[in-house]
Amino acid sequence: MRKPDPLGKNNSNSNNNVPSKLRKGLWSPEEDDKLMNYMLNNGQGCWSDVARNAGLQRCGKSCRLRWINYLRPDLKRGAFSPQEEELIIHLHSLLGNRWSQIAARLPGRTDNEIKNFWNSTIKKRLKNLSSTSSPNASDNSSSEHRDVMGGFMSMQEQGLMAMYNMNSSSTSLSPSSSSSPSLQSMALNHLINPLSNNMVLEHGIDMPSTIGFFNSTSTQCMNTNGAPASVGLFGENGTFGAEGELFVPPLESANFEYVKNENTYDDRNTNTNNCLFSNADSIISNNSNNNVNKVDQLNSGVGNNWVGGEDLRIGEWDFEDLMRDVSSFPFLDFQVE
DNA sequence: AAGTGGAGCAACCGCCAGAGC
DNA sequence: GGCTCTGGCGGTTGCTCCACT
């Protein structure tokens, strides 16, 4: 961690337009208080205005980061649960280093947090595993393999680990070393037909019949065989999904307003809001309203909407369902460059 | 007790995209 | 179309803590 820079000496800011008096380094408790109070009273606006109006000698970007990664009231603190770890691995295998999109599916977690966790912990485990695995890891005689998290690896992951092992001699095991999709993502992509927006899974990957996905041009939630899935149909008014059924939104879906127990959730402006809803009462499409988040909505969480008053919490998710569905869900918004 | 190295993590850096002029 | 500003994102840095020797 960096020391606070009370005199603002260390000021080679990347933004050349920022005056040199701006502070850098660790945030002091006083600065945190200022920013927190300002955000709670005024809500999010232009971040450079936030910095100025809150009386902070910080650039807007710094304020934004501090708020998103540390001060936001809906942040979940503490160690990652095994379920979260497993979900991160699954999502990373699908999305690569798209931390913000991974974070969008982990309520209360930030992209920075997940990125740090991956780089410091999971990557190391994968590396250790790849270095200790036999070179013939792709020769899977058994149907199930224990993965690094102690759970059973999916078919995709077994193949991915095989790719890891096959490539470990020629690459530096760097799924996070570039902005391109990770090795896992690339491996996974081999399992997905890239020619169709419907992305039919190949090679006998099992697709749960009760879960569908959205193609990029229609609102129809499809099954792998092209038939409508049993959940996830958008209606003309944007509502969909029977109560109690699992809905998995597409990554780059339209903005939604999540309504639960009369608490309206303003899900705009930030793409850290998309969540997997296991028991949403209703979800209303919300494409037109670009209002700025307001204080009362901030109090119920800008970014992810999982705060003290909300009765839907991470620990209450059906992670078993979540993992099963996510692991086989062909998210549509990523491409292999 | 002192030194050392790794782990964890907050924050910065640099790039990019979109909006506005 | 070009420029500037702003927000967002992924990669990286560097500081602190802590276990180990």
Image (cartoon, coloured by chain):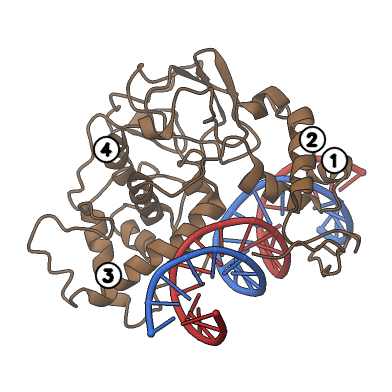
Chain colours: A brown, B red, C blue
Subunit of mark 4? A
- Gap between marks 2 and 4 measured at Cα: 40 Å
Amino acid at dot 2: Tyr
* x, y percent for residue A334: 46, 51
Label 2, residues with CA under 10 Å away: few <14, some 14-19, many ≥20: some
Which sits earlier in the primary sequence, circle 2 or circle 3?
A: 2
Which sits earlier in the primary sequence, circle 2 or circle 4?
A: 2
Give the vertical position of A5 relative to A69 (above or below): below
Residue at screen point 69% across, 49% down: A66
- Gap between marks 2 and 3 measured at Cα: 47 Å
Q: Mark 2 near mark 3, Cβ–Cβ under 8 Å?
A: no
Name the residue carrying label 1. A54
* x, y percent for residue A337: 48, 63
**Residue A38, quarter of the rendered image:** top right
Say which of marks 2 and 3 sits in front: 2
* x, y percent for residue A15: 81, 62
Label 3, residues with CA under 10 Å away: few <14, some 14-19, many ≥20: some
- Gap between marks 2 and 1 measured at Cα: 6 Å
Name the mark on residue A129.
Answer: 3
**Residue A130, quarter of the rendered image:** bottom left
Which sits earlier in the primary sequence, circle 3 or circle 1?
A: 1
Check if mark 2 and mark 3 are on a common chain.
Answer: yes
Residue A98 visible? no
Amino acid at dot 4: Glu
Name the residue carrying label 2. A38
**Local SS, label 4:** helix
Q: Mark 2 near mark 1, Cβ–Cβ under 8 Å?
A: yes
Name the residue carrying label 4. A320
